[in-house]
Image (cartoon, rainbow, N blue to C red):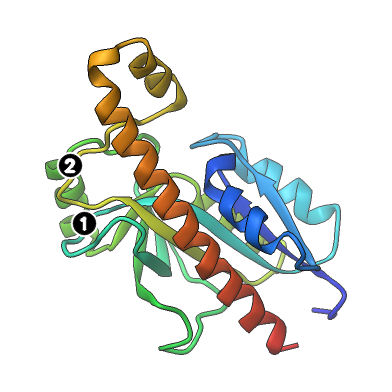
Amino acid sequence: MPADSDILIVTAVPQEIKAFQKTNGHLKGILLFETGMGDPTAFARVRRQLESGRYRAVISAGFAGGVSSGFQVGDLVLASEVIEESTGRRLKPSVLLESGTLPARVGPFVTVKKPLRTPSSKSELGARFRALAVEMETAGVADAAMQAGIPWMGLRAILDPMEQPLAVGSVGQGLGLLAQPWRWNRLASFLGSVRTAGESLARGLEILVRRMDSRN
């Protein structure tokens, strides 16, 4: 790809990329694109975006749930492949950085249609696919990139380790907690995890982008 083409970073919601925008807004050659969480139209929207410009790489980035033991909030995971749960398809990234380039565990992601809320559901999925993380968008993003002939990668920050239930599965559930003062501690803990995961993802994306730029 030409050096003057952009890197497209695809996230689901603004909270995932907020910290990166704050600390790396000066970086050139990057375009940010939001799909919405688990949006079934994400593939078509990403594909149209890729057709509208010049891109040398696509990064599917955001938060994920751990489906393997030993993760802490904010730990980074880099996709060795992404598995679409509904079909069993396995998509391999076109680019995988050398070991030690990024402080992240490397392994499979599983893309699901609905968030996994309980430790038991996350543990079962991880064992079934021998995966590290679960999320809702990477398979669609990867599919769009591959059809456009553009290299892709997947980078996620753990929001809810396998051993912890997912406190808030959607914006609507978060707003519901706001209306229940006796559950504000739960919401505060969740927002703290969002901040930690967002800051970690920002650091990982900066390393990833700079490393990719150094190859051109």
Q: For the point 38% across and 67% down, which residue is it?
A: 77
Q: Residue furthest top?
A: 179
**Which of pointers 1 and 2 lies earlier in the amino acid sequence?**
2
Counting other residues with Cα less than 10 Å from the Cα at mark 2, is it few (<14), some (14-19), or many (20 or more)? Answer: some
Q: Residue furthest left?
A: 120
User: Percent from the top left, x then y, of residue 135?
Assistant: 40, 48
Residue type indicated by callout 2: Ser
Measure the C-alpha gap from mark 1 to mark 2.
Answer: 9 Å
- Measured along the vertical axis of the image, is residue 183 above or below residue 18? above
Which residue is denoted by mark 2 in the rendering? 121
- Measured along the vertical axis of the image, is residue 155 above or below residue 16? below
142 sits to left or right of 173: right
User: Percent from the top left, x then y, of residue 105?
Assistant: 33, 74
Counting other residues with Cα less than 10 Å from the Cα at mark 1, is it few (<14), some (14-19), or many (20 or more)? Answer: many
User: Percent from the top left, x then y, of residue 149?
Assistant: 70, 68
Is residue 112 shown to the viewer in this render?
A: no
Image quadrant in which you'd find residue 29: bottom right
Image quadrant containing the N terminus: bottom right
Q: For the point 70% across and 52% down, which residue is it?
A: 32
Is residue 128 shown to the viewer in this render?
A: yes
Image quadrant in which you'd find residue 86: top left
- Measured along the vertical axis of the image, is residue 48 above or below residue 144? above
Helix, strand or loop under label 2: helix
Dot label at residue 144: none
Image quadrant containing the C terminus: bottom right
15 sits to left or right of 25: left
Q: For the point 53% across and 57% down, which residue is it?
A: 61
Q: For the point 54% across and 34% down, which residue is it?
A: 39
Contact flag, marks 1 and 2 (Cβ < 8 Å) = no
Which residue is denoted by mark 1 in the rendering? 126
